[in-house]
Image (tube, helix red, strand yellow):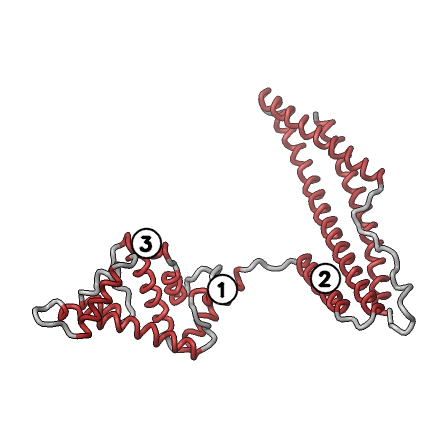
Amino acid sequence: MLLLATLGASSRARAEGAGQAPPADAGASVEAAVVDPRATQIRALLAGTLDVGIDPQSLFDVSLADEGAVQIDAARVRTLLQGLEDSARAIPSARGPSKPSASASAAASAQSAIQALDPVRWGARLDLDRARLEFYSLPPQRREELLTAQAVRREASRPKETDEERRQREAEEERERALAAARSARTEAERALAEEMARLVAIEREVAHVQGQFHVLRGALATRRESLIGWQRRVREAKAGTPSDADGAYDALRRALRGSRDELSNVLVALNEAASRVPELGPDRLSEIPADISTAEVIKRRTLIARRIDEARAAERSVADEQASTLLDEVTVLNRER
């Protein structure tokens, strides 16, 4: 494939020396791509169609931000390909009747060494070098444009961060900062203060997460109420249809009613147990902090979180009541329609 079959053919050698991919057997090209897909990926980068999951830097061995390194690698690859072309031209003279020249002998020796290599891997490596040289040979400004375009496409493909994810991320970053402050504290009192702040931030994050779950549950209950209207419509249609339609609707209605009753029972048990998913604030750990160390910021944060915990528990009770009411209505309606 590629150069192996061309070291004795000057037309192909010229194509390789110019950094162009010579014609090759389709099956061999596929094999080479399997061995190393980076040549194909670099050409996709050049065409502006590189997969957004691929970072262009991963396709090169030198930093693309280092223009000096790029130029050195370009010179290395260009010299390699030119040397292979020169070797291909020198091989015929080594086979003539007269004593071969030193360069022809070296070329013949190089050809023998190449022929001992895995042809698919060797061809794939050369194809990668040619693809890299194509990129290196572009003006710096054009290379930068291609890299910027790929970066924009990669950023656009990333899932957008939700408000909940943003809050969780910011809370975790704040907690890490508090822990870092605790590690670098000069005294035990300062360390205890920073650790308490980190603990409060973690509780605040959990409260926000639970509040988000309550919001999701309210949405699910609204959907459930809409589904109940659909059940009523289905019963009306079954009554107006065939006996088979009525039997099918009746069986489905019984299954739905059984499931609703079980869910209602579980919700009522949970209401009676009064177990809360909202975390506790925990004991005040500031009493042992010396008076000369300001605790105002931590106290302010604790007061804020205490209020949010109260709000979350009120929301929890409200959504639990709403859930029980929705399920009770559902059981009543399904039982009547049955």
The amino acid type, in three-letter code, at marker 1 is: Arg
Q: Give me the C-alpha separation between circle 1 and circle 3.
A: 27 Å
Instruction: Name the residue nearer the viewer: 194 or 101.
Output: 101
Q: Tell me which corner region of the image, top left, top right, bottom left or bottom right, holds residue 303.
A: bottom right
Give the structural element (helix, strand or loop) at label 3: helix
Left or right of 1: which side holds 208?
A: right
| Quadrant where the image shows the N terminus | bottom left
Give the structural element (helix, strand or loop) at label 1: helix
- How would you rate the neighbour count of disc 1 (Cα within 10 Å): few for under 14, some for 14-19, many for 20 or more? some
Question: Residue at left 30%, top 72%?
Answer: 80
The circle drawn on residue 94 is: none
Question: Residue at left 43%, top 65%?
Answer: 59
Q: Tell me which corner region of the image, top left, top right, bottom left or bottom right, holds residue 294.
A: bottom right
Q: Give me the C-alpha separation between circle 3 and circle 2.
A: 49 Å
In the picture shown, does residue 307 fall above or below 327?
Answer: below
Comparing marks 3 and 2, which lies closer to the viewer? 3
Q: Are marks 1 and 3 in contact (CB under 8 Å)?
A: no
> Along the polypeptide, which appears first: circle 1 or circle 2?
1
Label 2 belongs to which residue? 171
- How would you rate the neighbour count of disc 2 (Cα within 10 Å): few for under 14, some for 14-19, many for 20 or more? many
Comparing marks 1 and 2, which lies closer to the viewer? 2
Left or right of 236: which side holds 36?
A: left
> Along the polypeptide, which appears first: circle 1 or circle 3?
3
x, y percentage for residue 252? 64, 27
Question: Residue at left 83%, top 68%?
Answer: 188
The circle drawn on residue 30 is: 3
The amino acid type, in three-letter code, at marker 3 is: Val
> Along the polypeptide, which appears first: circle 3 or circle 2?
3
The circle drawn on residue 153 is: 1
Question: Residue at left 69%, top 44%?
Answer: 220
